Image: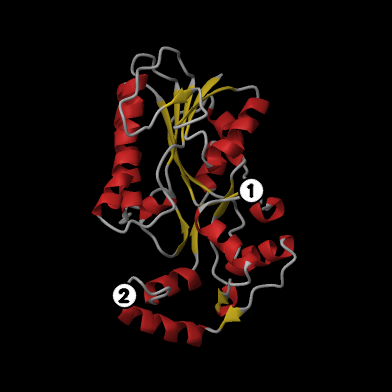
Amino acid sequence: MKVLFTGANGFLGKNVIPLLREKKFQVKTFGTSNADYIYNITNTIVPFEETFDIIFHAAGKAHSIPQNKEEENLFYTVNFEGTKNLCKALEKNIPEYFIFISTVAVYGKDFGDDITENTALGGYTPYAKSKILAEKFLTDWCKANNVKLFILRPSLIAGPNPPGNLGDMINAVKKGKYFNIAGGEARKSIFWVEDFADLTAKVIGKNSGIYNVCDSDNPSFKEISDKISNILNKKSSASIPYFVAISLAKVGDLLGNKAPINSLRLRKITDSLTFSNEKMKRELDFNPSNVMEKFQI
């Protein structure tokens, strides 16, 4: 089957495309450079002359905190308008399947356990809101064009050289500047990036669906940081007592957004945030990898 993979030069593309090809998928790449189709997704895309069986739409903006209105708008331009541009270019030759990489951020939860796909979409950041708009657009577009839509909402994604918060943690451990708080007992859902290739194979022959994408283990901050420390031959990260952290957080509340920690950020670090993957396992017959067993840098 022929796959069009958008965001081919990103973290997912670099890790997933080679595995899709190993599985005998014919992959055409889409990106801003070094791709079969070179486009900036925020601009008009020339209609595709060839037909694709599967669209794997991973292109998007993430892993940054907007500092002004212009940077906020860029999330909508890339994640929402870019998705619309892609779909318009596909209307000459409609695919059978569309896999959209969304995010668990659409739920707007900073803490909670086993959050399911039935949870209301309360995402409040520009990133989350832009993904919600893209999900809604794709739901309507795929229904109108008889395309099977699979919305995947991954949690923290692990793999070689990861971006975002996990990449920041790795760099902090390398420099000896990472500290757990209150023992690092809070648990977070996590997903192994290479599993996206297996998931792609699993959707074939299935109907549309929305799925949380994470493993079943939900490791703690301490387990993750200890794994990183072990790989890097570093000592386990020290832990800051909770009473010290809460004192720093109260100071941060007074200083505003420039402070490295405040009460909300402290709760995000010390309270668990996990998501249920039961629907993915049941409907797609997919058992995700245990990330801590596969973890590498």
Q: Position of residue 238 (x, y in %)?
A: 63, 78
Q: Position of residue 70 (x, y in %)?
A: 26, 50
Residue tagged by mark 1?
160
Decide: is 74 above or below 125: above
**For the image shown, how many numbered marks are present on the structure?**
2
Q: Position of residue 22 (x, y in %)?
A: 68, 27
Q: Position of residue 55 (x, y in %)?
A: 46, 27
Task: Kindly report the distance in space between the C-alpha atoms of the residues bearing marks 2 and 1.
Answer: 34 Å
Of callouts 2 and 1, the N-terminal one: 1
Residue furthest to the left: 69
Residue tagged by mark 2?
256
Taking depth in this image into account, of 209 and 109 the one nearest to the observer is: 109
Decide: is 104 above or below 144: below
Amino acid at the residue labelled 1? Pro
Query: Residue at the spot x=45%, y=14% of the render?
Result: 51
Decide: is 193 above or below 221: above
Query: Residue at the spot x=67%, y=56% of the render?
Result: 292
